[in-house]
Image (cartoon, rainbow, N blue to C red):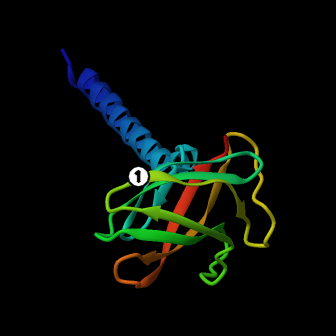
Amino acid sequence: MDCRKGQSAVEYLSIYAIAFAIVLVVLATVYYVFIAPGNQPITPICKFPIDINCVDFYVTSSGNLTIVIRQTSGHPITVTGLNCTAQNNPSAVTKSMNVQFNEGEQKLLVNNQPCYRSNGDVATGSVGSYYAGKLYIRYNETDTGFSHLLVGDIVAQYE
């Protein structure tokens, strides 16, 4: 009996099965590397390099920011100005205020402060979409008198 024909057919099918599996792996890799990342959810962030931590924040669909911060500068501070904008303009601190924080204290910094687009318009949006911009906070250390301007990043989902 000649068993070589059966062996040849099995080898032939095995090679095609392996080639098919390799093609599936390549297609899955291409999908997850190039297509799927666009579908991943955006993570809301609010961060500053030093001295201030965002505890809670949100932007309403009318473009108004509410933010609770904790200050960790090591000094009592007085926040004297704030701006929420997509512009890269640190001198544009528009909201004047006088909010005092002790070291480690957490409190509401601002409620219903407008955030702005790069063209200067109020950043309104539909619920579920995202606002991305900069937070500029100007503050003075109460005990030393030193003045600081912190620039932070914000990505917030409209509520």
**Residue 116: image location, x then y, percent:** 73, 65
Q: Secondary structure at mark 1?
A: strand
Quarter that holds the N terminus? top left
**Residue 19: image location, x then y, percent:** 37, 40
Q: Nearer the viewer, residue 20 or 4?
A: 20
Q: Nearer the viewer, residue 115 or 80?
A: 80
Q: Which residue is mark 1?
A: 106
Quarter that holds the C terminus? top right
Residue reaching furthest front? Answer: 143
Total number of numbered discs in the rendering: 1
What residue is drawn where x is 65% and y is 71%? 96
Tell me which amino acid carries mark 1.
Gln
What residue is drawn where x is 46% and y is 46%? 32
Against 146, is 18 above or below?
above
Q: Nearer the viewer, residue 155 or 37?
A: 155
Quadrant of the image occupied by residue 24? top left
Against 119, is 4 above or below?
above
What residue is drawn where x is 70% and y is 46%? 60
**Residue 35: image location, x then y, percent:** 55, 48
Q: Nearer the viewer, residue 67 or 131?
A: 67
Q: Is residue 47 left or right of residue 159?
A: left
Q: Is residue 138 left or right of residue 124?
A: left
**Residue 101: image location, x then y, percent:** 42, 62
Question: Badge 1 local density, few (<14 within 10 Å), some, or many (20+)?
Answer: some
What residue is drawn where x is 32% and y is 26%? 9
